[in-house]
Image (cartoon, rainbow, N blue to C red):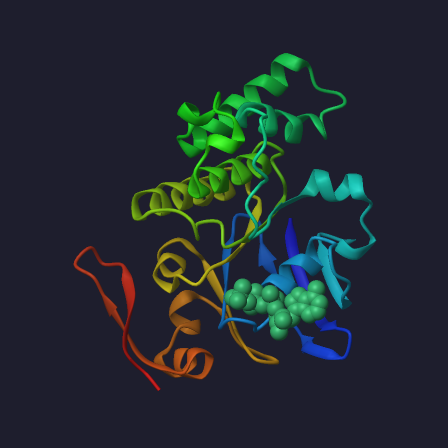
Amino acid sequence: MSLSIQNLHLAHGKHVLFNDISLPAIAAGSLVAVLGPNGVGKSSLVKSLAGIHSYKGEAKLNDFELSSMTQYQRLKHLGYVPQALPQASSLLAYEVVMSSAKSLAANESSMRITEKVEQAFMTLGITSLAMKPMHKLSGGQKQMISLAQALVREPSLYLLDEPTSALDLNWQIRVLEAVRSEVTQKQSIGLLISHDINLALRYCDQIILLAPNELLSAGSPMQSLTSQNIRRAYNVDARIEKCSKGYPIVLVDQAL
Ligand SMILES: Nc1ncnc2c1ncn2[C@@H]1O[C@H](COP(=O)(O)OP(=O)(O)OP(=O)(O)O)[C@@H](O)[C@H]1O
């Protein structure tokens, strides 16, 4: 499986976000960070791939043009986790994840669906939330249920719009380790929008770095996140160092 994006043009009416962006092919098993400053078009890019906004150009999962997919094919192949948290309701978290699993599973036994739902809660380490009503969950807990709704459908392509923005330090690591291992084990592909460069450096194979109207770089984390590129994208002076555990980290010296 691979994701290919060629000559992509994204706009909201007359407001052009990107013109003619092409990326190196993204292979199965890759987790790819989409980074860049506020308002640059990260969510718009992912929403376009998810079928929420239109695009011009080519965005293919294998040979399948994403914009030509039916609603059912999108449900089957794409795991979109939006920035917005799921709605508060009296439904149990378990029921919310179950309904996501059932939306696809016409040919699966109810025992198999139940196994998948339980597995999604276990993968994320959130079984203690399963029997809680959605309106009693915190923001971060709701965010994890939103991710469980995507995981349970075992998509080929995850489109994750800041999936750890509401999570504390411990849960950010646990959730990203779960996503990383899911993508590797199932040989799916993940696009992960984030403002946390250090998490992206730690968990992603590739980084797409965006600046206004421009793809600054797309490649390995160390290729993409040079001081020069970070400066151009975010207007800050920054250094890439290694922490005592050997992970690369970005240290910001000052905003310019
Ligand atoms: N539905 C829409 N209609 C018109 N303009 C939009 C729409 N959605 C987003 N925009 C505009 O497109 C630009 C990119 O927005 P987008 O949400 O994609 O940015 P982003 O990089 O994800 O930002 P952030 O990091 O702040 O979440 C912004 O200028 C925004 O105002």
Q: Compare residues 256 and 36 and report the one nearer the observer.
A: 256
Q: Compare residues 147 and 167 and report the one nearer the observer.
A: 167
Which residue is at a point 39% across and 47% down the rendered structure image? 167
Q: How many numbered marks appear? A: 0
Residue 68 in the image, given as x and y percentages of width and height:
83, 53
Farthest residue, direction bottom: 256
Which residue is at a point 44% across and 37% down the rendered structure image? 141
The C terminus lies in quadrant:
bottom left
Q: Compare residues 124 and 254 and report the one nearer the observer.
A: 254
Residue 78 in the image, given as x and y percentages of width and height:
66, 45
Res. 107 image quadrant: top right
Residue 142 in the image, given as x and y percentages of width and height:
49, 38
Residue 225 visible in the picture? yes
Rendered view: 190 above or below 44: above
Which residue is at a point 46% across and 34% down the rendered structure image? 137
Rendered view: 51 above or below 236: above
Res. 95 image quadrant: top right
On screen, residue 6 versus residue 30, left or right, reads right
Task: Find ligand 1 in the image and state its quadrant.
Answer: bottom right
Residue 220 in the image, given as x and y percentages of width and height:
44, 66
Farthest residue, direction left: 244
Which residue is at a point 70% across and 60% down the rendered structure image? 48
On screen, residue 239 versus residue 96, left or right, reads left
Residue 23 visible in the picture? no
Rendered view: 256 above or below 138: below
Rendered view: 171 above or below 96: below
